[in-house]
Image: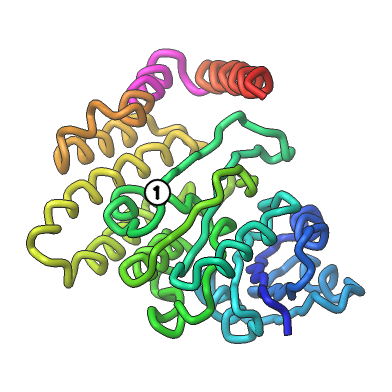
């Protein structure tokens, strides 16, 4: 029996899935299976996976159910004690499974292990952006303000957590459904972190995460669920959670093709209304600068400035190494 089950939801994924799969099959940890859930793809995803000769790779095809439904199918068929999730366009460092599984082996009380995350673009090039969260143990309060797990390709979860906390909420389809799951696990289990960027999170112009209208609805559902049974003394965190959600949403109109900076300003005002202190955060200030830049330089000017910024950031990261 494999120690780890890797669940890959795949919908029209052929453009990036080969690179993603390669990063899994090149892991230094050997006791794993890969469950690719073909979630109603209309491209050649199913045919490509079916021709893989590696016996560790299993293909399951279903009608489209979104990320939540695809991950739940993977969990249902998983045989491992630990379950790791990987989106079909992201990439893992070779030691990811080994380091996370080792922590779960050594700490039986821990429910979830996450890692640091590095951002890449559509050409698999680093953007220079790395998220280095430090929170461990009881992370629920921290998690209500920000999804420290960052993306769906990071977490390795003890299988028993899903038996205790349930599986992914299918009503959320493909928007912040992972944050909802991690919040439920964090309410009952401590977390651990591997302080290395072992996941490369791909930023795509047509990503579902750019659909800020649907995300806004999902954020509200998740926050209301998370605080439905929270003691009175912790209810103050709810406004901070809404503020952080609006800060996250404020990036989406700028990342969308329309580059709607006015909507970004709207979300910033909403964030400030929920929690005025957020105006002094680095993220709030960065967003204000981005929105002003878009207003004065327009779409092309903003893109050029962003390209220069990413180049300088990659250069700074390279020097730091």
Q: Which residues are magenta?
A: 288-299
Residue at the image position 12 percent from the left and 52 percent from the top: 236
- Residue 24 as seen in the image, left or right of residue 97: right
Residue at the image position 71 percent from the left and 34 percent from the top: 125
Viewer-closest of 226 and 296:
226
User: Is-magenta flag for residue 213?
Assistant: no
Residue 40 in the image: state x and y as whole percent: 65, 74
Which quarter of the rendering shows the C terminus?
Answer: top right
In the rendered view, tell whether residue 23 sits above or below residue 275.
Answer: below
Secondary structure at numbered mark 1: loop
Direction top: furthest residue: 296
Residue at the image position 63 percent from the left and 68 percent from the top: 9
Which quarter of the rendering shows the N terminus?
Answer: bottom right
Viewer-closest of 123 and 152:
152
The quadrant where residue 175 appears: bottom left
The quadrant where residue 274 appears: top left
- Residue 101 as seen in the image, left or right of residue 53: left
- Residue 46 as seen in the image, left or right of residue 216: right
User: Is-magenta flag for residue 289?
Assistant: yes
Residue carrying label 1: 135
In the rendered view, tell whether residue 69 sits above or below residue 241.
Answer: below
How many numbered circles does the render carry?
1
- Residue 29 as seen in the image, left or right of residue 99: right
Residue 260 in the image: state x and y as whole percent: 40, 33
Magenta-drawn stretch, dominant element (helix, strand or loop): helix
Residue 227 in the image: state x and y as whole percent: 20, 65
Residue at the image position 52 percent from the left and 53 percent from the top: 151
């Amino acid at each position: 029996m494999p120690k780890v089950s890797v669940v890959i939801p795949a919908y029209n994924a052929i453009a990036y899935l080969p690179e993603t799969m390669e990063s899994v099959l090149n892991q230094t940890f050997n006791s794993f299976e890969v469950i690719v859930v073909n979630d109603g793809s209309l491209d050649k995803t199913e045919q490509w996976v079916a021709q893989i000769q590696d016996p560790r790779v299993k293909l399951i095809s279903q009608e489209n159910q979104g990320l939540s439904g695809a991950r739940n199918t993977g969990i249902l068929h998983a045989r491992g004690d630990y379950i790791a999730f990987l989106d079909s366009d992201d990439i893992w460092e070779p030691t990811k499974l080994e380091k996370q599984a080792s922590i779960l082996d050594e700490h039986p009380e821990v429910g979830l292990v996450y890692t640091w995350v590095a951002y890449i673009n559509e050409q698999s090039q680093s953007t220079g952006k790395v998220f280095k969260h430090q929170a461990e143990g009881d992370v629920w309060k921290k998690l209500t303000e920000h999804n420290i797990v960052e993306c769906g390709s990071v977490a390795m979860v003890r299988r028993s957590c899903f038996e205790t906390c349930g599986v992914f909420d299918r009503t959320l389809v493909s928007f912040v459904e992972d944050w909802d799951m991690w919040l439920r696990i964090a309410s009952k289990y401590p977390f651990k972190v591997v302080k290395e960027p072992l996941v490369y999170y791909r930023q795509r112009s047509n990503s579902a995460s750019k659909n800020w209208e649907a995300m806004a609805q999902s954020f509200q559902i998740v926050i209301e669920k998370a605080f439905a049974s929270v003691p009175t003394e912790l209810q103050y965190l709810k406004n901070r959670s809404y503020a952080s959600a609006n800060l996250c949403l404020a990036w989406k109109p700028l990342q969308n093709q329309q580059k709607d900076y006015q909507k970004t300003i709207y979300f910033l005002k909403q964030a400030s209304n929920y929690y005025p202190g957020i105006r002094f955060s680095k993220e709030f200030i960065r967003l204000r600068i981005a929105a002003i830049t878009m207003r004065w330089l327009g779409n092309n000017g903003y893109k050029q400035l962003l390209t220069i910024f990413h180049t300088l950031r990659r250069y700074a990261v390279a020097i730091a190494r």
